[in-house]
Image (cartoon, helix red, strand yellow):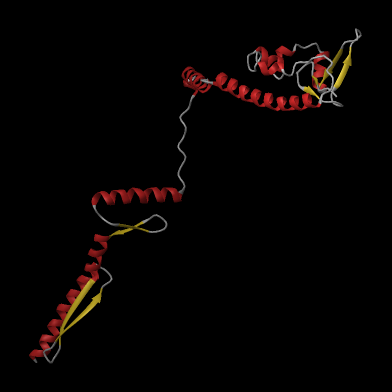
Amino acid sequence: MRIETCYFCSRPTYPGKGIMFVRNDSKAFRFCRSKCHKNFKMKRNPRKLKWTKAFRKASGKEMVVDSTLLFAARRNVPVRYNRELAKKTLEAMDQVAEIRARRERMFYKRRMAGNRKREALAARKLIAEHSHLLLPQPKRPLHPKLRAKKLAALQEAQAAANGLDVHVDEDGLELETTDAVKSKVAARRMVRQRITADGRVELEEEMAAGNSSALVGEDDDDDDFDDDDEMAMD
């Protein structure tokens, strides 16, 4: 069986598929599908429809002059069957198909070379002509977690520039610098000195709630010292 070619779109029409139309002058037309048959009856030109092979060849989108295209040309020459000849023909068909595919890829690359540059220039020209239609895009607010991480990273960078160590928790919030922690701990630590009736001096170390309580504690120390002095005097 022979694989026919669609008269309208030039697609292959396999045996048992497609539509065959015979005109009054006994000329036969084969179509791969009803779409091609309807366009043929509406007397449309295949070279003016973008989905046909005739349009692509006419507009330079496919190869037209190539030696591999002659291999599939129709030859109505009767040849005596020869097994070796059939074997060589099948091998040649695979080689020709591979060569044709490689040449088509090269043809496509050469045809599409510089296409991106042309599209970029066209887009720039369009933007320049209609720049008055462009509106400033509003800035979308950041997610709270992203904002916290960004703030933590900024604080770490500032602390590194100042030479301080910064502790950051999992949520991205700054806790305290090392120097600030040391100063607070030193301020909250309170030492009491107490003189007993026997004349012994006792030291008591306590942690106050804050700086204000530490000051109150100092005043209490003075009161305790005065009371002990009075007891010793007695």
Which of 28 and 196 lies nearest the eye of the viewer? 28
Residue 4 at x, y = what percent? 81, 20
Which of 198 and 185 lies nearest the eye of the viewer? 185
Q: Is residue 60 left or right of residue 87?
A: left
In the rendered image, the vertical position of residue 118 relative to residue 168, given as above or below: above
Q: Could you tell me how many numbered marks the image carries?
A: 0
Residue displayed at 26% across by 68% down: 210
Residue 17 at x, y = what percent? 85, 26
The reply to whether residue 49 is in sight is: no
Q: Is residue 228 left or right of residue 4?
A: left
In the rendered image, the vertical position of residue 119 relative to residue 202, given as above or below: above
Residue displayed at 75% across by 24% down: 89
Residue 145 at x, y = what percent? 45, 51
Q: Is residue 101 left or right of residue 79?
A: left
In the rendered image, the vertical position of residue 191 relative to residue 26, given as above or below: below
Which image quadrant: the N terminus?
top right
Farthest residue toward the left?
A: 233
Q: Is residue 170 left or right of residue 70?
A: left
Residue 179: quarter of image: bottom left
Which image quadrant: the C terminus?
bottom left
Residue 68: quarter of image: top right
Residue displayed at 17% across by 75% down: 219
Residue 15: quarter of image: top right
Which of 10 and 163 lies nearest the eye of the viewer? 10
Residue 32 at x, y = what percent? 81, 22
Which of 234 and 140 lies nearest the eye of the viewer? 140
